[in-house]
Amino acid sequence: MCKWYGLTLTTPELCKLAIIASSLVKKSGSGGDVAASTYGGWVMYRAYNREWLEAEIEMIESGDSSLHKLLRKKWPRFEVKRLKVGAGLRLLVGWTGNPASSAELVGSVKAGVKAGDLTAHNPAKTSAKAYAKTYEDFCVQSEKCVQKIANALENGRIDALLSGFARNRALLKDLGEITGTLIETPKLTRLIEVANDAGLPSKTSGAGGGDCGIAIARAEDFDAVFARIEEEWQNSGIEALGLKVAEFDESGDLSLIEQRKDDHIEIAYHQYNAQAESGFEHVRFIPNALPQLALNDVDTSVRVFDKTTKWDTPLYINAMTGGSKKGENINESLARVAAKTGLAMASGSLSAALKNPQLAETFSVIRRFNPRGFVMANVSAGASAEQAIKAVEILQANALQIHLNAAQELVMSEGDRDFSAWLNNIEEIVSALDSMKVPVVVKETGCGMSARDVLRLQNVGV
């Protein structure tokens, strides 16, 4: 439909739009199925705040907001993160033959939370306050459990998945007991037990109460274990569905990469203030009425990179952007300025181009409009030596910047979470580029570096 109408929605925007449409049709459901359909592949999903979205939609209907603004907003709690699950894991899905209504199950849980009086299910007659606290604990523990399962999936650890799924099952059992809701039906119990007996992690799918259950198997064992489980499931009235996770090529997801880059530009645009203080306003030069020199004697040049390179001025255009059409236009303008003034220039992080070659032009435009200038490529400390070399080649760069941005990665839903190899990566990059006579500079993106960090970098050749 987007192609038909010529719309260029990003994946996150398309997902939000689909959730809005879904929420207008039905008032229950987490939106997880919508996110999975929109993104494809393996994803970790955190549901949006339903009351907040309903209020936002009411504002649109009253004319106080717009759909465009809502799509661009950051939604409370809402998160969709792609999981980097390799081909070593396969999914099995079993259908119990009994459809379950998410609306009814969610409604049952909410009713239990609101009532708080569990006389029929809990002789202790838990108070409403204590009951709500118990439900809150369930949510907190479930969040931790999901994070561990996501990590286990990305690392292909069946043992961690077994324990994670078992923990999830125990939490759901407790929830069922405190709300008086049947989440794991006898057939779902049998589905899980059969899978567990075969050494596979297994759990209910969706809201439970029937419907489906899933199991995870190693790819090399899949055919044999599927044949065994399929027979036992069938004997228990459970149908093994021939489903698999849709294959997804991350490098093809231009929209997510481009949106992140455009978000950076949008934020910078709205925060820009021509009258902002930079620190220079506190500097006053002492008048020198007797300079005792000629203008031609003034030398503003500076030598950098162990004094092997000379810049005419001690200023350069630092890393800005790239990875989207807006970023390409900005890079072209900056490159023209650099070429006219003789300033050195660094590109934004080339991670986007390394993931998808189609975005390389949004960076190489710098060299195209500044063919003889001093240009620095830019990569993350998570990049390999091969990727660093590729980044240098894309820009025909004179030097390479490596940026340290752990804090930024942690606050981005799709950001990296493992920084254990950074120092080793930097050492390998320095070694690889040394033979190419390409110097390396390491910088931090806003939080600074300690003296200890600087010494560690120096020790690996920076």
Image: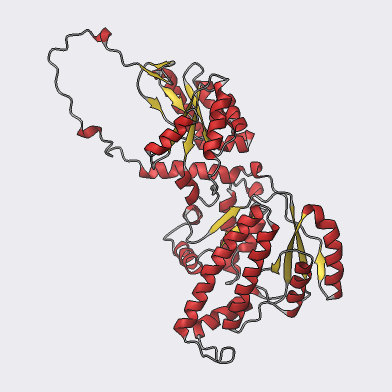
Residue drawn at x 43%, y 16% as measured from the top left: 309
Q: Is residue 148 above or below residue 448?
A: below
Q: Position of residue 109 (x, y in %)?
A: 57, 79
Q: Is residue 444 above or below residue 38?
A: above
Pick whichever, 307 or 93, lies toward us: 307
Quadrant of residue 44 within the rendered picture: bottom right
The number of numbered badges drawn on the structure is 0
Q: Position of residue 288 (x, y in %)?
A: 14, 17
Pick whichever, 197 or 409, lies toward us: 197
Residue drawn at x 64%, y 74% as measured from the top left: 102
The chosen color scheme is: secondary structure
Pick whichever, 238 or 385, lies toward us: 385
Query: In the image as oriented, which residue stretches furthest toward the left?
Result: 289
Q: Is residue 323 visible?
A: no
Q: Is residue 139 above or below residue 385?
A: below
In this rendering, position of residue 309 left or right of residue 233: left
Q: Position of residue 399 (x, y in %)?
A: 50, 24
Q: Position of residue 417 (x, y in %)?
A: 54, 49
Residue drawn at x 55%, y 47% as measured from the top left: 418
Q: Is residue 22 visible?
A: yes
